[in-house]
Every structure is written in C-alpha cells, then in structure tokens.
Image: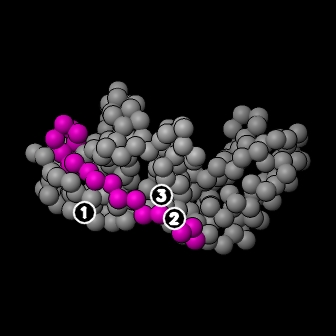
Amino acid sequence: MSLLGTTALLFEAPGDLELASQKRIWALARETQAWPEVRESVPGMNNLMLTFVRPPRNMSALQELETRLHEAWAAAVELPIEGRVIELPVVYGGEGGPHMADVVSHTGLSVEEIVALHSAPTYPVYALGSHPGYCYLGGMDPRIATPRRKVPVLSIPGGAVSIGGAQTGVSASAGPSGWNTIGSTAMSFFDPLQNPPALLQPGDMIRFRVERIVK
C-alpha cells in the first residue's frame, strides 16, 4: 500500500496479474466504495486506488485502514461481472499499423500469423485508465508479446490498436504512446455527452474482427 499525496492511496494486490485476481479487485472496489471515509474506489490493473472524503489524519489511523484493506482483500471473493461483448472491426497493417513490421521482426511470425493470434481471443476489460475511455485488456497470446518502444511515438490517433509487452489495447483518443501500433478501428470509446461517457466498463469483453489486412 502506498500514499498518493494526502488524499488517496494505492492498494496493490499480491501475486500475478490474472483474471481471477482482477475479479477480486472488482469485489474489493465494490466493498470499499461503501466505506464512509471513501470518496471513490477505482480498480486498476491488479490494484485499487482509494480517494478520501476524510483522509487518515495520523499514522495510527493509516495503519488501521491498511489492516482493514488487507482483511477485506483476504475475504474478497471473485466478482463475476457479466459484461457485454463488443466487436471491433480492425484494419491491420498499412498506415494505421505502422509498427507491424517491428512485431514481425521481434516475434519471427508473419503478418497473417500475428493477425490470427491477435484476433483469436475474447479479451476481458480489466480496468479503465491512462486516458478517458482507455481499456486495459487481459488475455493476449504470449507469442505476439513485443516490448514497448525505446522511443515513444509523440502521437497516435484514437482507435489505434497496439501491443505493449504482454498486453494489447486500443487508444481512445490521440496522444503519445510507447506501444507498437499494428492496426486501427473506427470505433469511438469516449463521449462526454453520454452516460456513462466511456463505451466500455470493467467486465466487458472485446473481440477484434479482421476487417482487412494492408501490407
């Protein structure tokens, strides 16, 4: 557990990042949201951020809160959120996938093999973060895992489908990125006029449908 300034803290779950552990994070988020001193309980990737209405005022209160969190984590049971399955049409390669060649070079696989492996799973949405509407996904095939770029790209467009390490994701808006962009989708992931503004929520699932491959 670590403090984030004076009004928030981060609880990091022990163990590896996997769906079973993430479901316990969802359960812990739901429980702690009802604690009177908590303003917001935000699940992340294998962690939980709490912001406070009334932050702990001394070390004793902080230690008591830490004990409550650890006890709640130990008692947490996987929360099986039955979310929606969203299909995203993806154009792989070409101008919208400028780093496909780097993934080919790192993995030793062909473009067709990378696309087949990337589009095969149904990816669970673990958490939202990084920027509004962005989803952290689990379930990518480790055979296409590719390290993040040594020099980040200053801006990638919204809808960019990328690989970073053992994860894949879709940019919800334009911005800098150190991930390897292999394709693009026209789907919109965030609209401040909608309720909720983010298209996807933890527990939803994503399927990447191959629209076409551009070489």
Q: Closer to the camera: disc 1 or disc 2?
A: 2
In front of the other: 60 or 168: 168
- Secondary structure of residue under mark 1: helix
Residue 84 in sight from this viewpoint: yes
Asked if residue 152 can be seen in this view, the reply is no
Q: Are marks 3 and 2 in contact (CB under 8 Å)?
A: yes
Label 2: which secondary element? loop
In the rendering, at what x and y percent does residue 59 appear? 86, 43
Q: Could you tell me the amino acid type at mark 2?
A: Gly
Q: Which mark is residue 83?
A: 2
Residue picked out by circle 3: 125
**Is the residue marked by circle 1 packed among few (<14), some (14-19), or many (20+) residues within 10 Å?**
some
Nearest to viewer (mark 3 / mark 2): 2
Residue in view at x 38 percent, y 49 percent: 169
Q: Left or right of 169: which side holds 43?
A: right
User: Counting residues from the N terminus, which is met first, the one under dot 1 or under dot 2?
Assistant: 2
Which region shows up in magenta? Answer: 80-100
Residue 88: image x %, image y %?
33, 54
Relative horizontal placement of residue 2, taking residue 91 as reference (left or right): right
Q: Quadrant of residue 21?
A: bottom right
